[in-house]
Amino acid sequence: MQKKIFKLGQVFLVSALSYYIVFFSSFNTFQEAQPFFGFLFGLQILTFIFVIGFYLLLLSLTNRNWLSTTLILLLAVIFGFVNHTKLTLRNEPFLPSDLGMITSLPELIHMITLKALLLIILAVIAITGLCLLVFRKQRLKFFNTRRSRWRTLAVALLLCGGFFSISNSKSPVHNLGLALNNDPLYWDPVWGVKRNGPILNFVNYLNSDIMTEPSHYSKKTMLALQKRYQKKAQTTNKTRQTLKNTDVVLILSESFSDPTKVPGITLNQDPMPYTRQLLAENPSGTMISNGYGGGTANMEFQALTGLSMGNFAPSLITPYTQLVSKLNTVHTFNNDFTQSIALHPYNGGLYNRHAVLKKFGFSKFYTQDGPDYFPYKDVVQNNPYVSDQATYQATLDQINANQSGSTFYHVLTMQNHMPYLKKYYPDNPFKVSGDLSTSEKSQIETYANGVNLTDQANRYFLTALQKVKKNVIVIFYGDHLPGIYSHVNFKKYGVQMHETPYFIWSNHATLTKAKAPSTLGPYSFESTLANVANTKVSGYTALLTQVTNQLPIITTNMLSSGDPNNVKTNTQLVTATTKKLVRSKDLTAKQKKLLQDYRLVQYDLTAGQHYLSTAFTKP
């Protein structure tokens, strides 16, 4: 009897310890966690029962006290560390889509501090040693009989399996979760991870939907829509030319933004004078990013496909890892070029880019981990990331080596990736003033120096391109602001903190500046290029042109307080002129119809029956 009581007490205590290790990872201090400690008690009990079930599962499978206890505590520490680190650096919790980056573990480790890495290593050693010490006399079997072991295994599988089906509307556990006030809060994952706890929040994102089916979706509707927009394209193309013997370079500049526009700070000098001149003289404007401090792959996805994150289901966080693998075919910006080449001076395994870009039709993807190896490793001073100038030089090498046909270049820089450490640039000339902490001040100054280096690299790249005989068009945009502005009130300046610059430039062709929207979404680059370069469009591009010119920007995540439109669709609409959020119900009838058409097309291309023919995306 005493042994049974001891074992029950062990299961309860170890499960409780594991649960609270993960629970407290969503908070920076115990005081911050206190209001949530007994919040929605039923959900906490539900999650705690799952942890018990998981521990019993380990015990049943291994039948070893020390091994099962070591495993669950180590998993709790790792889960908690990843969750806390993501919340700190990217304002996002740990999600199932992050598991797709496990193959890039060495590069991810490189992004965390040495102190944090040492703490994790010490925790692993301490937990393993402690479990061996505590259970030194009980290293043999946990269960005395085979019957009790298999019975426990069945119960554990039932508990764990039921819990992992909580996002399935047909599951009994789903209904139990609703009764206990489970709310995934897809529109605000940070609030969701605090309210529901990291474990339940993680499970809520499993088996996520791609997109809610729009009303009136059918083969008849889609074929009529295709015919309508192809007719618009034919009318447009009567006065347009074909993009021949022209290269297009789409540059995603990591974390590039204008720090002089951030509220509450003043820099001693302009970090981007050359780029500012380019913005004034060429088709240019502001892009509304979905991300802040991260989300690069989502900007890539939208820029290459023309699909908006705002139309997807809220639980579809990262299309590169959650969606693309499920699609047989995908239309992308580069499809109509003779060849497509991507360059990224880092690990291509992050966000599953190797597989994604191959599916997108890129014949070469130059990265540091191959199989096509990025040729340069040049850095600036103590910054560990490859410089923008080296990335541009690799791009120039490719342009000079591919003189025939039309090549599409997808260029992803890394120079300005977080963290922003003072030691990167010892002789940093940039100084910032404002009501800032010492840490924030240091990061902003380091970041400003990085922006200036990008500005210089832009001059180097475009000057070199002017000497290239072949026509080259460059589309440059920043993917998001760096996550370093802790002093800014996002409820007041949310949209402003998601604005990055973009410009379109050509070494020889004449581009029409007036046709470039002052504000656009990342899904609008293909249609905007066609407009400013006066080139032929497909039915799909004709639709995107109208979406760009007639609708507010369709986006997400503008405010930390959540979605002012429709929580279920995760859509936020930002007017191009006033930069204010508007509700879907405030659109005109014509705008509502256009938005419906766009959603129908996006649904058909991703989650639907693919009624649209390939001709719809061909000029």
Image (spheres, helix red, strand yellow):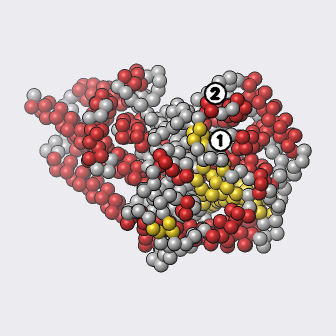
Rendered view: 539 above or below 295: above
Q: Mark 1 points at which residue?
A: 552
**Which quadrant would the C terminus be assigned to in this image?**
top right
Nearer to the camera, 5 or 259: 259
The answer to whether residue 543 is above or below residue 530 is above
As rendered, which of 288 and 530 lies closer to the eye?
Answer: 288
User: Residue furthest toward the bottom?
Assistant: 427
* Residue 543: x %, y % from top left: 75, 39
Please indicate whether residue 357 sits to the left or right of residue 292 in the image.
right
The amino acid at mark 1 is: Pro
- Give the side of residue 77 with respect to residue 617, left or right: left
Of helix, strand and loop, which one carries label 1? Answer: loop
Q: Is residue 261 above or below residue 202?
A: below
What crowding class fits label 2: few (fewer than 14 Cα within 10 Å), some (14-19), or many (20 or more)?
some
Label 1: few (<14), some or many (≥20) within 10 Å?
many
Q: Which of 540 and 501 is in front in this view?
A: 501
Image quadrant in which you'd find residue 276: bottom right
| Residue 121, image x, y percentages | 31, 58
Whether residue 57 can be seen here: no
Q: Which amino acid does label 2 sit on?
A: Pro
Residue indicated by mark 2: 214
Say which of marks 1 and 2 sits in front.
1
Which part of the image, by quadrant, shows the N terminus? top left
Callout 1 touching callout 2 (CB < 8 Å): no
Q: Is 578 on the left-hand or right-hand side of 99?
A: right
Image coords of residue 79 (percent x, y): 36, 46
Q: Disc 2 on helix, strand or loop?
A: loop
Mark with earlier residue (1, 2)? 2
